[in-house]
Image (cartoon, rainbow, N blue to C red):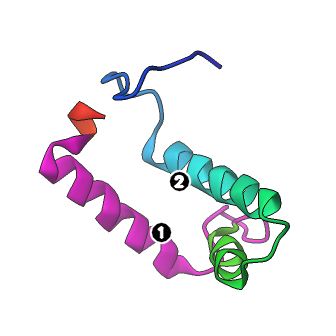
Amino acid sequence: MSEVNYPGDETPRLTVRQAFDAVHQFLEAYWERGLRSSDDIRHLLSAMDGSMTEDGAPIDRAQWSDWLEAVAKVEASGRAKQC
């Protein structure tokens, strides 16, 4: 993995789905470092998990809709180009 200075590279390198999966991995690592003590993060990770669905979509389909809304907000605010 290449090193990126923050604020980051303006070149998109992940698809929206890959970014969703990256956030899932980030949260899982954070949860692990916290000795799995957060039930809130555990519930969120479970809802985001797509390993048990046929199409790989999150178990809680609303998570994907929420994710797309978050992506749209960041794009609309222009922060996607600055960070």
Toward the viewer: 16 or 10?
10
Q: Which residues are magenta?
A: 50-79
Structural distance between the alpha carbons of marks 2 and 1? 8 Å
Amino acid bearing label 1: Trp
- Residue 20: x, y in percent? 53, 53
In reply to whether residue 16 is colored magenta, the answer given is no
Badge 1: residue crowd in 10 Å (few <14, some 14–19, many ≥20): some
Left or right placement of residue 61 versus residue 27 in this view: left
Q: Kindly state the secondary structure of the residue where label 1 is placed.
A: helix
Q: Inspect the image, locate mark 2, and give the three-letter code of the amino acid beneath it.
A: Phe
Residue 77 is covered by the magenta coloring: yes
Find disc 1 in the rendering and name its residue. 64
**Tags 2 and 1 touching, CB below 8 Å:** yes
Percent from the top left, x then y, of residue 18?
Answer: 55, 43
Q: Position of residue 11 (x, y in %)?
A: 34, 21
> Which tag, 2 or 1, sits closer to the chain's start?
2
Q: Give the class, few, some or many, for how many residues have Cα within 10 Å of label 2's Cα (few <14, many ≥20).
A: some
- Taking the image as shown, residue 10 lies to the left or right of residue 33, namely left
Outermost residue, top side: 2
Tell me what residue is drawn at x 53 percent, y 78 percent. 61
Relative to 27, residue 26 above or below: above
Circle 2 residue: 20
Q: Quadrant of residue 57?
A: bottom right
Q: Is the stretch drawn in magenta largely helix, strand or loop? A: helix
Residue 39: image location, x then y, percent: 72, 84
Residue in the image at 51% along x and 46% along y: 19
